[in-house]
Image (cartoon, rainbow, N blue to C red):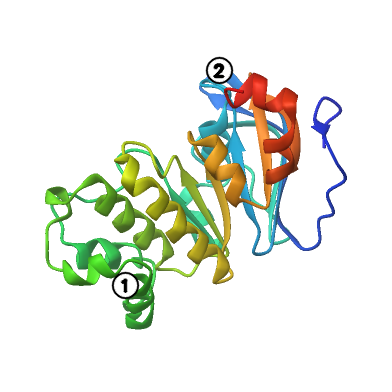
Amino acid sequence: MSAETENRHPVTLKDGILEVRDLDAGYGDLQILDDVDLDVDDGEYVTIVGPNGAGKSTLMKSVFGLTNYMGGNIVFNDEAIAGQKPEEIIHKGIGYVPQNENIFGKLSVRENLEMGAYILDSVPEDRIQEVYEYFPVLEERTGQNVGSMSGGQQQMVAMGRALMLDPDLLMLDEPSAGLAPDLVEEMFDRIDRINESGTAVLMVEQNAKEALRRCDRGYVLVQGGNRYMDAGDALLDDEQVRQDFLGG
């Protein structure tokens, strides 16, 4: 980790699939990220938290090639991907669900899922069935236009579409944003199940306490740089982290 990152306790990494080192990135000439480091192990569940404007979403977008790369390294499955375009990165085994504009509202559930497999010669029916197993309500509404569905159901469609290529890493940007309180825990349960199936998860989440409670490791970003990294439950138990970033 960079010199300014505080690793609260020793954390042993085993089989890293994503390694970000000294990443500088932003939009146009505006630099948002400064020497950011990040690791995700194979099958691991990692959460990024921090105050608004800390650069959390920018970090996710940078991994997926959606920002202006300014320096540092991004390595996925032993291949340098920094500076590559999203249409190249999606072939590497990374699925990404942005917070906004993540569905095709005029298309049906089935058509949205098929769009997730657009780079393949044919739609893999087994993957559609696996998505339906994660999200049974989508099978019930397979022909419904997604624009007429609830926010929670639309989020399931977006996640399902990203899973169509069976990614090694699923990146989720604020998956619980805008959901009714009674649906938030259900959404987290579904993410847990996806991770338990073997898919690594990297998530930015506003509900920091719940996200850290469930994840393997967490990162706290502040003003575009690393502040803390530790196991999720250790960050929850850290008094300084709680006071500064989790509301006590």
Position of residue 172 relative to residue 244, above or below, is below
| Amino acid of disc 2 | Asp
Q: Secondary structure at mark 1?
A: helix
Q: Position of residue 178 (x, y in %)?
A: 31, 36
| Amino acid of disc 1 | Tyr
Q: Position of residue 140 (x, y in %)?
A: 18, 71
Q: Residue at x 49, y 65 (%)?
A: 194
Q: Position of residue 201 (x, y in %)?
A: 56, 55
Task: For residue 231, say whether it is visible.
Answer: no
Q: Secondary structure at mark 2?
A: loop
Marks 2 and 1 in Cβ contact (< 8 Å):
no
Q: Position of residue 30 (x, y in %)?
A: 55, 17
Judge by depth and name the residue closer to the eye, 60 or 148: 148
Mark 2 or 1: in front is 1
Q: Label 1, on which residue? A: 132
Q: Is residue 5 left or right of residue 223?
A: right
- For residue 136, what is the image quadrant? bottom left
Q: Residue at x 36, y 70 (%)?
A: 131
Characterize the local packing of mark 2: few (<14), some (14-19) or many (20 or more) Cα atoms within 10 angstroms.
few
| Quadrant housing the C terminus | top right
Mark 2 / mark 1, whichever is N-terminal:
2
**Total number of numbered discs in the rendering:** 2
Residue 29 badge = 2
Q: Residue at x 46, y 51 (%)?
A: 96
Position of residue 104 relative to residue 173, above or below, is below
Q: Residue at x 32, y 46 (%)?
A: 182
Judge by depth and name the residue closer to the eye, 195 or 74: 195
Residue 177 badge = none
Q: State the separation of the CA atoms marked 2 and 1.
A: 43 Å
Task: For residue 61, say whether it is visible.
Answer: yes
Q: Is residue 173 left or right of residue 247?
A: left
